[in-house]
Amino acid sequence: MSRLLGLATLGKRRRAGDADGLGAPQFAELAESYRNKDLLEEAKAVCEQGLEAWPSYVSGHIVMAKVHRDSGALERAEISARKALELDPMNAVALGLMGDIALRCGRWEEATRYLEQALFFSPVDTHAAELLKLARQRTQPTVAATLVQPPPAPEPAPAPPLPAAPPRAESGPQSGTEKNLTALRQMSGVEGALLLTAEGLPVSGSLGKGNEADEDIAALAAGLVGEWARSNQMPSCDPQGLAMLEADGGQLVLATTDGWILLVAVSGHMRLGRVLGDIRRIADQIGSAGN
Amino acid sequence: MQSALEQLNRTPGLLGSIIVADDGLVIARHVVRGVDADAIAATISALARSVNALSDRCGRATVRAMTFESDSRRVFALRLRIGSLVAVAEGDASVGLVRMAMREAVAAIEEHAPSVRYDRAEDTPVHA
């Protein structure tokens, strides 16, 4: 049964007033399905109804917390996540949620503690690992002093334009970035890599067509990313996004990261899946260096 | 055309699919709530122009496939003779599965495309 079909079936049961027929796991599943489809009001209603009947059902509180978080109601999200933790203090998802919420509220150290606990109970949780990395970056004194913004708002909020690239000496990237770009250009199938600012100024690397062409290409790439950033219906490219463009003569990959844009030209015969992971990793390292 | 979109939307993680004319108008759609087909169509059309300008300056031909992704969402676009087929998916949807399903949908749509023209006045596709 497809997810949509499952959602429709559960939805019908709910509409038919069959609340008693929805077992605890079913109400949480239905609410999570609504949440995944951005139907937050419906998800919230299902959670409220379900938790009224099963107030000790941990997953119900977890989904409720996620719904509140996605709606931007972080205080309510925290109340629901805490309730889940009271019922199950070692629940890795609830711990991860507490970390996520603390991170969004700018409580970096608290976020670090919760996320470390979440990873202790669930070491394979890559999302928690990513958040922990972010929280640790924020708790570093030299970095924390420069950061005044909390992490990006949850999903339904419109995507803001890309932030301006962080200022740096002579607009030049650090030596680690140069090394990363060199390593990228030496990869099989990669024809060139150009790092540019969100304003369209080439900073490092080349697509091998000369400086003038690189400048034109950087301006066009930044314009494209700007258009992408302005659409709140498209996947957000702030702080990170990936665009893959496939043409007969070759392929282009645009990786956005914290105000930087990495443009990579890949030959037409190379399967993008083989290089995407490295491009994303290097873009992330460039973003970290920029911060 | 509509049945091709319905079939495509059975792919796990897919939130909807749209056939977009080159001028950004929707020819056919099959989307769930929360996906604004008209806004996506207009955006894809505008992005396609910028993408092709970039591709041209980089020495590439016209772009036939575009994918935009973040952690939370993926948008795919494939060239059609009559415009583009666009699919909106959750961030964790399988890229391979979606692309395979899109290629099948393109074949089905292209099979019927010659008999379809776009009626601007009515804002609907007209089957000849």
Image: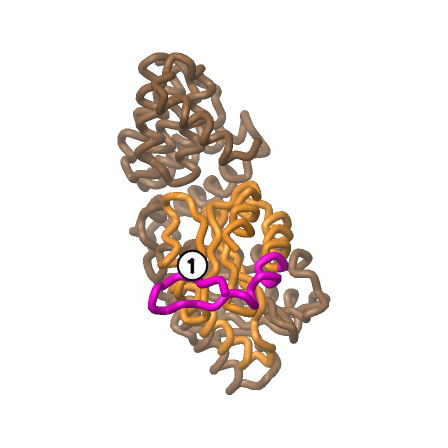
Disc 1 crowd rating (10 Å Cα; few below 14, some 14-19, many 20+) is: many
Q: Colour of chain B?
A: orange
Chain part drawn in magenta? B107-128
Pointer 1 indicates a residue of which chain? A
Q: Position of residue A211 (x, y in %)?
A: 53, 85
- Residue drawn at (55%, 34%), measured in percent from left and top? A2
Residue flagged by tag 1: what amino acid is it?
Answer: Asp
Q: Say if residue B105 shows up in the picture.
A: yes
Determine if the magenta segment contains residue A282.
Answer: no
Residue B8 placement, left or right of A241: right
Q: Position of residue A280 (x, y in %)?
A: 56, 56
Q: For mark 1, what is the residue?
A: A258
Closer to us: A205 or A9 = A9
Q: Colour of chain A?
A: brown
Residue B81 placement, left or right of A19: right
Determine if the magenta segment contains residue B119.
Answer: yes
- Residue drawn at (52%, 47%), measured in percent from left and top? B6
Residue A228 placement, left or right of A212: left
